[in-house]
Amino acid sequence: MTHQENKLVLNNFFHSLFPIEKETVEKITKNFTPFKLEKNSILLDKETVSTKTYFLEKGYMASFILNEDNDEIITNIFTAPCFVNDFLSFFKKEPTKETFQTITDCTFWETDLETVQDNFHSISQFREFSRLLFVINYHNLNDRLIEMISQKAETRYLKLLKQRPDIFKHVPLKIIASYLGITDTSLSRIRRDTSHF
Amino acid sequence: MTHQENKLVLNNFFHSLFPIEKETVEKITKNFTPFKLEKNSILLDKETVSTKTYFLEKGYMASFILNEDNDEIITNIFTAPCFVNDFLSFFKKEPTKETFQTITDCTFWETDLETVQDNFHSISQFREFSRLLFVINYHNLNDRLIEMISQKAETRYLKLLKQRPDIFKHVPLKIIASYLGITDTSLSRIRRDTSHF
DNA sequence: TTAAATTCTTATCATTTGACAAGTATTATT
DNA sequence: AATAATACTTGTCAAATGATAAGAATTTAA
């Protein structure tokens, strides 16, 4: 087994989320294959159908959409290890509106819908894991929406800085600004005004 | 069978989302029980664990959290027919942070986790339905977040007015304002400035 | 039906954030 | 190392939204 084929990080992700036997995880990840992308590569492009589900083993990514003015609106920032998916596109076979792009060099594992379906219908613990992954993703998204509704940019920035300090080391500020729903100018001002914290 | 026990709306909801046999739906909804709530009743209170999953058959609801200043921040507005759930609380048995309250008189169907689990692990089409429900809910939430990030309040208001005109007939404007992430004062101003549309 | 409570609107002023432009710093390319 | 490209900061002014208060309209309760 080469170093590239070491599924330790992938398999551990299952264990970290849900109590599950080693053998079951190995069965689930049997049909996952590894690959790498350099920084600033596109993993999944807008207006294409996502035929794979991706696990980000190492690196940083972002997803974005283009608004009417063709500005990139960052919709998510991903820190490994995590699954990176456009659920709607993958499960409903519809074109995605978002583009998923690497920020740093990244390593991935991928598998196709057929494998996911086999696992989903034959391994009850994978079903539970899948649902839990949805529940957690939904919950995180809901929390972020609540913050966007109820807190001003400075509060959101300070919270992100505290909860995900790592991304400030690896992700350009203009991407973080867009993720926070503000301009890079505004983020710069907020950072100046809060630098004493 | 009394009128109250007519599962037409509930059962049709399954058919509308996913191709599924009549008998399978009847099997799934066998253990759902009906109940009613008057307007301004609490369906699920903050800091309690959601032991049921709810289907809103008729009426309007909202969910909200309380921020630091004890202001209600509306997180969602529900129009029947739809499922109304705190996924995290229901599946992870954790206390919810949100309160779910009726806006009008409402009729519901409910069932418990044990029934959901039985269905989830024994009926493959229910698994597909459940996942699809998650996918659609996640997608709607993501769209709403993107709007919050990238569009100004007036644009979000006009879009809501176009996409869900019914709620403006049944839901107080101050609730809609909070849902849009603005004050009722601000919504009132926007409505004055856009009333010519 | 009247009184009270709630919702909605409007006005004024303050705060937050955006748009634009210029300049500096950093990173990538040759 | 030099050049170009990109990222970041700062300043100025404008636009969007919030906070507060007062009054009008509507709904609810007695």
Image (cartoon, coloured by chain):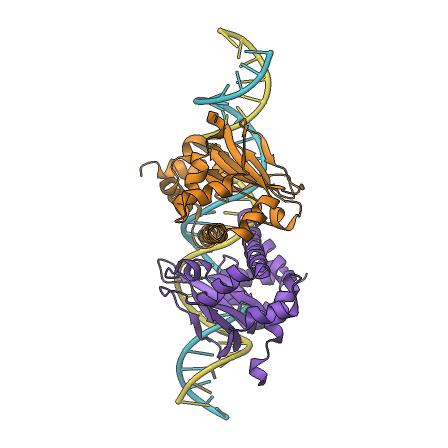
Chain colours: A orange, B purple, C cyan, D yellow
Snapshot quadrant of residue B112: bottom left
| Position in image of residue A79 (x %, y %) | 45, 37
The front one of D21 and B30 is B30
The front one of A1 and B93 is A1
Location of the C terminus of chain A (image quadrant): top left
Left or right placement of residue B162 versus residue D7 in this view = right
Q: Is residue B145 visible?
A: no
User: Which residue is the extreme one toward the left?
Assistant: A197
Snapshot quadrant of residue B188: bottom right
| Residue pictured at 54% horizontal, 37% vertical | A32
Q: Is residue A192 above or below residue B158?
A: above
Q: Is residue B44 above or below residue B190?
A: below
| Position in image of residue A36 (x %, y %) | 54, 28
Left or right placement of residue A14 versus residue A34 in this view = left
| Position in image of residue A30 (x %, y %) | 52, 39
Q: Is residue B152 above or below residue A56?
A: below
Q: How many marks?
A: 0
| Residue pictured at 61% horizontal, 71% vertical | B11
| Residue pictured at 53% horizontal, 58% vertical | B180
| Position in image of residue B31 (x %, y %) | 51, 73
User: Which residue is the extreme one toward the front?
Assistant: A23
The front one of B173 and C2 is B173
Q: Is residue B71 visible?
A: yes
